[in-house]
Amino acid sequence: MVRVVSIHSFRGGTGKSNTTANLAATVARTGKRVGIVDTDIQSPGIHVLFGFDESHMNLALNDYLWGRCSVEEAAYDVSHKLDSQAAPGSAIYLIPSSLKAGEIARVLREGYDVGLLNDGFQGLIQQLNLDFLFIDTHPGLNEETLLSITISDVLLLIMRPDRQDFQGTAVTVDIARRLEVPKMLLLVNKALSSFDFAALKAEVEETYGAPVASILPLTEEMIQLGSSDIFSLRFPNHPLTQTYSNVANMLLA
């Protein structure tokens, strides 16, 4: 049965898209068919990690929402990004949002039928025969994020060890509980190596009454990579890659 995983944060800058790409690639390498949808239509970005720019995108999620194409026509097979160690059957598809200023402006000006997103998600699952669908959401709370949370089998909430993030995450956790999300995990990202990770994990779990999947350290290699590639594929033996693998195993369980 397909599993829908929404990756969300209350504020921007948490590393949400990087985390989505790394977890999706890690899950795909186990032999799963994985789709990634960038629903951050107002400020798209995950495509960069897969080497995409405007010249690579003939169609995007926006085109589906405006009725210009079917949703699967906006899907790009990026399985070549997976390394040679990927298990047989591994596949990963990216459905990006448009980088065109006019398309973004139209969304901001006119909005779109959020109900089409759910139809699109189901269409992708069926047409691409997916095992996992990862949704890279827009930060904060709006109709799109509420839909994504509602249909999720797993909601992964990303936060930094920052008081603003603590307050915003509390709002999202409360809403997720009201929407009865089957499984909710917290992920603390960009923690300095000088932090006491065990104490931070305990504080977050006590604050929200939800399990912390992991504490991700802020690493120099991630900063230097600058979203030019998928970290776990570029640095397969790095401790952070092992952490991504541990979180991916929670999603696979």
Image (cartoon, rainbow, N blue to C red):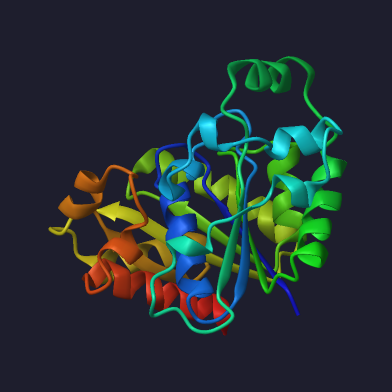
Q: Position of residue 49 (x, y in %)?
A: 42, 47
Residue 159 visible in the displayed image: yes
Q: Is residue 75 above or below residue 32?
A: above
Say left or right for 246 vs 59.
Answer: left
In the image, what residue occupies the spot 76% across and 38% down?
Answer: 143
Q: Position of residue 92 (x, y in %)?
A: 57, 64
Quadrant, the N terminus:
bottom right
Q: Is residue 249 above or below residue 203?
A: below
Numbered-mark total: 0
Q: Position of residue 30 (x, y in %)?
A: 50, 81
Side (left or right) of 103 relative to 110: left
In the foreground, 124 or 151: 124
Q: Is residue 208 left or right of residue 36?
A: left
Front-most of residues 5 and 226: 226
Q: Residue at x 41, y 51 (%)?
A: 18
Residue farthest to the left, as pictured: 194
Is 89 drawn above or below residue 174 in the view shown?
below
Front residue of 14/206: it is 14
Instruction: For residue 206, say whether it is visible.
Output: no
Q: Position of residue 52 (x, y in %)?
A: 48, 41
108 w.r.t. 231: above or below:
above
Q: Quadrant of the C terminus?
A: bottom right
Taking depth in this image into account, of 114 and 81 the one nearest to the observer is 81
Residue drawn at (82%, 39%) of the image: 69
